[in-house]
Image (cartoon, rainbow, N blue to C red):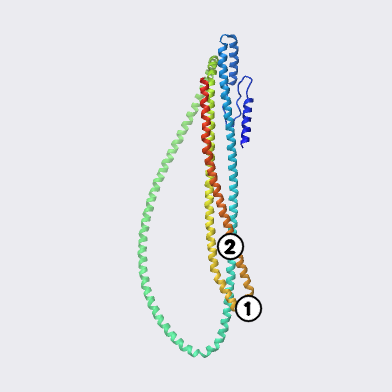
Amino acid sequence: MDEDRGKDHLKSKGSGNSLMSTNGFLFDPWHSTPVKKQTDEGSMARWTAKSINQQSSLPAMQGSQTQTSDLEITTIQKQRTELQLLIGELKDREQELNSMAASHHRQLQAWEQDRQRVLTLEQRSARLEDELQKRNEVIRAISKRLKAAEVREQDSRRELRSMQQRMQELSQRQQHSSQQHQDLEEKNRSLNSSILTLSSQLGQLQVHEEELSSMLKLKDKDLTEATNHILGLTDRLGESESSLKECQARESKTLQETEEYKRRLREARHQNAQLKDELQEKTLENNTQREELIRLRQENQLLRKELALADESESWKEELLALARSKQERTESELLCLRQVCEHQQNDLQLLKLNLETTRETLMQYESQRSLVSPGDVTCMYVDCSTPSPQRRTMSPGLVEDTALSKQQQEAFTSSTCRLKRLLAESQQMVASLELASTAVVTIRSPNKIQKMTPNSTASPVHRIC
């Protein structure tokens, strides 16, 4: 970078030396910001030629005038060389700012790529969660089927037992008949107690009906109040209709006034046409007066050319100040862009934190579901061991495979969360480095520019006074 700056500085010096004209004046160098064109340079050259012709006719005054003109030319050349050097330095600073903007743009692109990666990871995590839910539902369905099969087996066993017990029940029917008689007496007693409870409930219902009647009365009062409010609103509507009629009358008046204004405009246009004719007559008179003024201006140009040199220094000062202001505005705009980027990144970080919290909650839910499902699996295994059959031998390896798959899914889910945490840490480091770099560049460059601009701007009037 330093070698490139040196080359650019030498190029600017070479271009400054090549811009010298045959009369000893410098042409305006190319500038990135708009520079005021010096329209009086041709008139200056003509004036110098006329002054040389006049000096040849006056040999007595020639020596003193040539010395003063040489001193002025040398001071002007020195000032212009200094200004060209300053312009070269300003161009170097502009290149540096452009390189900084390009680097910021690259960093923004990298940040956007990271953001897209994070979004893809979130989508993958959502897909994995959906797959986990689907597989959990499949596991639940299988467990329900197993429970249904167990219930069927138990029902078949019960039916066998019931067939065995029917033989015993035939012998015990006499005993049951006596027991049924006792049960019927107990039922009669329970029915009497239920009648008493129903009578108490009837009393409570009557009290509730009285409360409802009082509530209905209150609602009737509310309805009367609402009707009164509606009547008030109707009165207000009538008032608003009367105000609308008044507004319509005002609109008709305004239309009449607009027609009158249009008529006045027509009269004013006719008067303007007459005034234009008078102006044409006066322009002819002014042309004659301008010819006289041109003669007077030609006499005053000689005096103004002497003052032009003093005005040039002030114009250079104003241009340099405009450059400094434009660069300050650029730096401020870049800082605003960086702040906006930081705010976007903070919002994205908050979103990522929320996603992490949701993933943690889903993990906790998944672990709790596993803890709830695990005792059911143990009971299934216990039942399979107690009843030997060929179906039990085929179901046990399926459960083992499902548990292995759930472990693999959990490991993949934990690895995705670790990656999200790493991406969060990297994005936070990028934001901190960008903020530090922007603040350092602004604080270092802004005072250096002002210090370099002020001494050169104050030096030009000193040379003029000398």
Tag 2: Cα neighbours inside 10 Å, few (<14), some, or many (≥20)? some
Question: From what the image shows, is residue 453 above or below residue 58?
Answer: below
What residue is disc 1 on?
A: 389
Earlier sequence position, callout 2 versus callout 1: 1
Amino acid type at mark 2: Gln
The spot of residue 291 in percent (x, y) is 55, 15
Secondary element at image label 1: loop
Name which quarter of the figure residue 383 lies in.
bottom right
Q: Is residue 37 visible?
A: no
Name which quarter of the figure residue 13 lies in.
top right
Q: Given this view, does label 2 or label 1 mark the residue nearer the observer?
A: 2
Which of 273/456 is in front? 456
The spot of residue 134 in percent (x, y) is 59, 64
Which of 172/100 is in front? 100
The spot of residue 43 in percent (x, y) is 58, 19
Amino acid type at mark 1: Ser
Q: CA distance from mark 2 to mark 1?
A: 34 Å
Q: Residue at x 60, y 10 (%)?
A: 56
Residue 410 image label: 2
Q: Residue at x 63, y 30 (%)?
A: 10
Which of 204/465 is in front? 465
